[in-house]
Amino acid sequence: MDFSFSEEQQLLRDSVTRFIRQDYTFDTRQKTVTSSEPFNREYWKTFAELGWLLVPFSEDEGGLGGFAVDLIVVMEEFGRGMVVEPLLASAILAGGLIAETGSDDQKHDWLTPLMDGSLQLAFAFAEPQQRFDLGNVATSAEPAGDHYILSGHKTVVLNGGAADAMVVSVSTDSSKPGSVSLLLVDGKASGVTRTSYKTVDGHNAAEVYFDRVRVPRANLLGAESETLPAIEKVIDRATLAICAEAVGAMESALEKTVEYTKTRKQFGVSISTFQALQHRMADMFIECQQARSILMMAAMQLDTSNGAAPKAVSAAKSRIGKAARRVGQEAVQVHGGIGVTDELDVAHLFKRLTAIQYLFGSTDYHTQRFISA
């Protein structure tokens, strides 16, 4: 089996790598993270111009193919650069759900402006009581003629503060556990309250409250009460994307740690000559290689669309979560006190790797899911 990237995938990777190295420097990123803006909108336009917003979607939807392997090519490089622009939240999550469940008209109306960079979306699904159970939805949508009346609270909505519209998971039939529907909700609709904030890793999220919001029935995505399988499929795809991001971030942390040990001296010699540190960096290298291997396995399983894909994704998330913890901690410890300062990029890589461990299910959750599958 050929595990190498195709010529098109290599060109895509080179495009992202070049942008990260030339334009998305650590200092530039920090200006965005410390500003009041959720992300750099000029960079988002650049993403659209370079065609990166087309990657998550199939050719029928106007995209470049929608293959998981293509997606991890982009997300790995995003991990290296610690990119905070909302490709995950807007295109992979919200856009993925519209592509999966929307009608032809809905796909045209929402995906076209998303892919040209003029529309921001978010997927509001997490709730305080949920604990990674996507079917545990307390936010309700009561039918009322040609509308639904939406009430509830969604927490940690990625890109929620900047989104023009949100895909919201709701319960339309409380008598049936796991009966979940999806509604497209205008971010500025009457009754919608959003409290935006920066997360520990520099990304943007929001607490979103719905107080009897009127949503047209035409904004229902897919069949009423039957969209949970589509949500699980898209979340698995998003989980693979952040696993790829983690692999890129881990490899960056390893490279920066090795470079640091070559320049840092103690007792008149470079600390890279200390055998104990060499062993620790060798362990970091092994963790990165194992993480990359299981990431490729999961991506190929997703692209074959067989029943083993969810189990493969959980295997990847579990293994990569453990690797992210070890590599992140080792990078900080080898750097010493400077490894936890805002001035050093390794500290921010560690924060992102820590956040990824709990996004879309913790390491323990996915280990149990793999066992139960």
Image: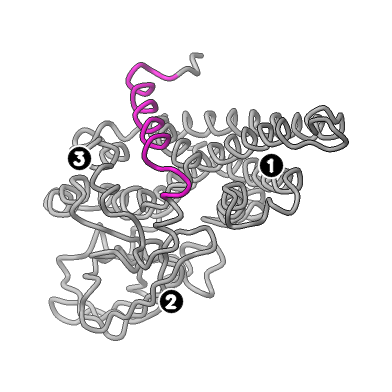
Reading the image, the residue beneath label 2 is 138
User: What amino acid type is highlighted by mark number 2?
Assistant: Ala
Q: Which class describes the residues within 10 Å of circle 2: few (<14), some (14-19), or many (20+)?
A: many
User: What amino acid type is highlighted by mark number 1?
Assistant: Val
Residue 124: horizontal and vertical position, in percent? 37, 66
Mark 2, secondary structure of its residue: loop
**Residue 19 lies in the magenta stretch:** yes
Q: Which residues are magenta?
A: 5-28
Q: In whole angstroms, how far apart are the C-alphas of marks 3 and 2? A: 32 Å
Q: Which class describes the residues within 10 Å of circle 1: few (<14), some (14-19), or many (20+)?
A: many
User: What amino acid type is highlighted by mark number 3?
Assistant: Glu
- Residue displayed at 59% across by 28% down: 293
Nearer to me, 118 or 102: 118
Answer left or right for 324 relative to 152. Answer: right
- Residue displayed at 72% across by 45% down: 335
Q: In whole angstroms, how far apart are the C-alphas of marks 3 and 1? A: 38 Å
In the rendered view, tell whether residue 22 sits above or below residue 236.
Answer: above
Of the 4 image quadrants, the one containing the C terminus is top right
Reading the image, the residue beneath label 3 is 61
Reading the image, the residue beneath label 1 is 327
Tell me which label, 3 or 2, sits earlier in the chain: 3
Residue 26: horizontal and vertical position, in percent? 48, 46
